[in-house]
Structures are given as structure tokens and as C-alpha cells.
Image: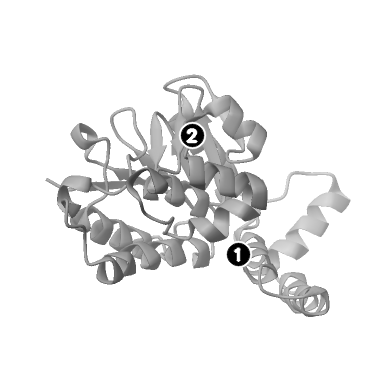
Amino acid sequence: MATIETHVSGSVLTIELNRPTRLNALNATLLEELSEALSAAEDPAVRAVLLTGRGGAFSAGQDLQEAGVGGLDYQEHLERYNRIVLQMRRLPKPVVAAIEGVAAGAGMALTLAADMRVAGRDAVFVTAFARIGLVPDSGMTFTLPRTVGWGRAFELLALSPEIPAERALELGLVNRLSEPGRARDDALTLARELAGGPTRTYALIKEGLNASARLGLEETLELEAQLQKVAGSSSDHREGVAAFLEKRRANFEGR
């Protein structure tokens, strides 16, 4: 049985974690299939990606039954997680995560690697790593402090409290809340909206945001100028200006 299900609706690729009896816990097979699905998202026909989980949970994180008491070969195992996080951050199109139920450990880390997050009001986030004597991985020491700040990140990582959806919204862990059972549909609506936008511009925005974490102000200003030069020569920029002047809705094509 496949642990990842994919389908395309319009120009949105939906990637669904599919181990509902295990709360979509992440094992080697699922991670390999997820990486393959993200590679398929490079198709030019795909202009946005929706990442979600089946069965009322996003993901409980690493499957501890696979790890066992003796643990994993973490260097080899984390290569799978790291590849996926980099794929999500480098993908030149928006990634929206829809979260119902639990998002814990590496499952929570995957939501933070997305560009936007829509959570059901029944969703719960848990960093989880310290609960089993591990440090955070899958990019969480990078994404979490940049989302909630240094002090709160340490608190969430060290004490690992359960974070209900309303609190997650206050902290900036999610962008929007949905009624229970509606997160996937609402996230799909958002993904479709993004897919209809200037997706070439979105790719440049992601490039700038990713680089800003390691650049100083002068380097950031220089990069912005370079990215703006690319954006300014795009068909979508010309269409956006024309639509503004003609007082009509822009018809962006992602070029």
C-alpha cells in the first residue's frame, strides 16, 4: 500500500501522507515516496503544492517503532528528512500545508518548511524531540526561531508543550484557522489562489526569503535588485501592469 497519495486538480498538486492507522508517522518508505512526489512537483504544469495527511492527522512524526529502543542510524536517516526539507524550500512554487489533528516532531517540522499553513481548530502542534531525549532536526532549529523568536523557540523545544491551534495562530505557526474537518478544503482554495497568481514572482520571493537568513543588509539589497531585474522582465509583470492600467483582473501565467 502506498504511503503517499498524489493527485492534480487544475494546477495544484496535492500530496497526502497516507498511514492513517499510524497517525501518518514517518518511516523510510513514506519519506522516499514523499521525496519522489516533491520531485514530480517540478512539472511546469504544477503551479502550487498542497501537503496534507489522511485520517484526521497531519503526522505524529518519526515512527518510533521503526526506530526501536536502540534508535536509528541518525546520520543516514536524517539525510532523507534533510532532502525533503530542502526540496520544499527550494521548490520554485508555493507549498501550502493543511493540518488537522496532530503535527508532532518531524511532522511539525514539515509544516514549518511549507510557505503557508492552514490548521483546523482541532489541530495540535508538539515539537516532541526533547520528550525522547533528542534535539530538533528536519530544519526546526532554523525555521522555528525565525517564526516565533529565539526565546519562544527554546521554550517550545525544551518543554515541548502541546500547542492548540488558536495559540499556534497567535505565535505565527499557522497563517489561517479552519473549522474542524475543513483545513484541507480551505488550504486547497488557498493553493488554487496562489496557483493563479504570478508564480514566477513567488519563486523569486522564496529565493529572497531563503537567502535573507544568511545575508547582511547590503547583500540583501543587492540580491533584491537582482531578483527585481528578473521579475521586471517577466511576462507576468507586464500583464500585471497592463491589468492595473486597464482596471481588470490580471491573467498570470507564471512566466
Tell me which colouring the rendered structure shows.
one colour
Give residue 28's position: percent from left, percent from top: 21, 58
Q: Quadrant of residue 199?
A: bottom right
Give residue 104's position: percent from left, percent from top: 39, 41
Q: How packed is label 1: few (under 14 Cα within 10 Å), some, or many (20 or more)?
A: some
Give the residue type at disc 1.
Ala
Give the residue type at disc 2.
Pro
Q: Foreground residue, 103 or 10?
A: 103
User: Disc 2 marks which residue?
Assistant: 161
Dot 2 falls on a residue whose secondary structure is: loop
User: Disc 1 marks which residue?
Assistant: 203
Whether residue 187 is situated above or below residue 26 in the rendered picture = above
Give residue 139's position: percent from left, percent from top: 48, 60
Seen at 45% across and 51% down, the residue is: 109
Give residue 57's position: percent from left, percent from top: 34, 32
Check the image and name the residue furthest to the right: 245
Res 11 visible = no
